[in-house]
Image: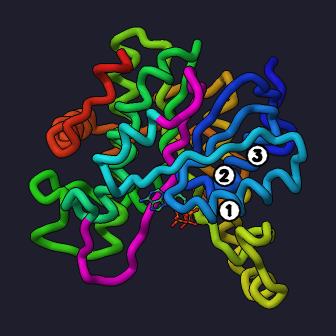
Amino acid sequence: MSTPWDVHRLPRAAGKTFLVTGGNAGIGYFTAEQLAGTGATVVLGSRDPAKAQAAMLSIRSRIPDADVRHLLLDLADLASLKSAVDALDVDRLDAVVHNAGVALDHPPRRETKDGNELMFGTNHLGHFALTHWLAPRLKAAPAARVVTVGSFAAKSERLDLDDLQSTLDYRPKRTYGRSKLAQMYFGFELDRRLRAAGSSVLSVVTHPGGALDSLTPSRPPVHVRTTGERLRGLPAALLVQGKEAGAWPAVRAVLDPQVSGDELWAPRVFGLRGRPHAQTVKDHLADAEVAARLWEASRDLTDADPSRPLT
Ligand SMILES: NC(=O)c1ccc[n+]([C@@H]2O[C@H](COP(=O)([O-])OP(=O)(O)OC[C@H]3O[C@@H](n4cnc5c(N)ncnc54)[C@H](OP(=O)(O)O)[C@@H]3O)[C@@H](O)[C@H]2O)c1
């Protein structure tokens, strides 16, 4: 019988290298911190060198022998991604965690440098293209993983394949939910393509549940929680959790040999808080036809196709 997964006693991963996009803040920071504790080399993909430095200092203050590095990465600039990856100073990548994300609450509709709607362009298209450029390094690892961080919000959304860029009808919360749904379709479709090709690379989809800053332990200067914020946040802890716990599903998806690609890893309690566990992929999330059509559209929008170099 295998030992139950303990989020506080992770297996050693010395010799491995993991990239966490948006590793400078929030759930990505805690994902990087927890992975750094395994002895692995952890690369923080961040568009802001000062924030990345602060995150690395914080991780090193807690794990003195941590091997953490920074990769300059702006997912909202597709043309920059190839050279960003060229600067990655490793031949082999054991996992990438597609964690970075942007969520807008209010209009106006905004666009990336490439003219894509900001949330769809950053969260989905940026990670889609990044996977393409990372492929040779992922293939060089014996059993690499592509871990995509989706969202609970995707469950109540449906994609409009005729308006992926929300040009005709822009509602920020819905466009965000759809961008996360697109990411999850990407992760499941990549899994199907990798398995069909007999690839050693695994694609795993996770989501963090609900993760609030007010329930997140301080990591100055990356994140500082006052006593007042902590007390005001307490009632919410019945339903949701902090970002340290929000990192657990992605960390498990990187490290646990039992994880497979046709599962959705999420918090145990109503999918909102608690230890990570595997859920069955069902309903619209399992729609392979929509996922395939999204893949084609994403390929056309990015001039990249991650399944080709990976399989
Ligand atoms: N928190 C939740 O309850 C929740 C629920 C469901 C899903 N999620 C998902 O979990 C992930 C992390 O969420 P979070 O709450 O930790 O968010 P967060 O605290 O806002 O952190 C987002 C991270 O993404 C980075 N980022 C944004 N745009 C980027 C770009 N163009 N290029 C590179 N990095 C970029 C940010 O960098 P900067 O610091 O430079 O802005 C930051 O590091 C996201 O994918 C989110 O959709 C979160």
Kind of residue at badge 3:
Gln
In the rendered view, tell whether residue 2 sits above or below residue 57: above
Range of residues picked out in magenta? 87-111
On residue 247, the disc is 2
Q: How is the protein colored in the picture?
A: rainbow
- For the point 73% across and 58% down, which residue is it? 244
Q: CA distance from mark 1 to mark 3?
A: 12 Å
Q: The N terminus lies in which quarter of the figure?
A: top right
Q: Secondary structure at mark 1?
A: helix
The residue indicated by pointer 3 is 34
* Residue at 44%, 42% in the rendered image: 84
Q: Compared to 96, does 223 lie above or below?
A: below
Residue 125 visible to an observer of this rendering: no
Image marks 3 and 2: residues in contact by CB distance under 8 Å: yes
Q: Is residue 65 left or right of residue 57?
A: right
State the residue in front, 265 or 148.
148
What is the chief secondary structure element of the magenta stretch? loop
Q: Residues within 10 Å of mark 3 (few under 14, many from 20)?
A: many
Element type at mark 2: loop
- In the rendered structure, find residue 54 and report the number of the disc placed on it: none
Residue 103 lies in the magenta-colored region: yes
Pick whichever, 298 or 246, lies toward us.
298
- Of residues 32 and 173, the one nearer the viewer is 32
Instruction: Find disc 1 in the rendering and name its residue.
Output: 243
Can you say which quadrant of the picture contains the C terminus?
A: top left
Was residue 275 drawn as part of the magenta stretch in this picture? no
User: Is residue 222 shown above or below 100?
Assistant: below
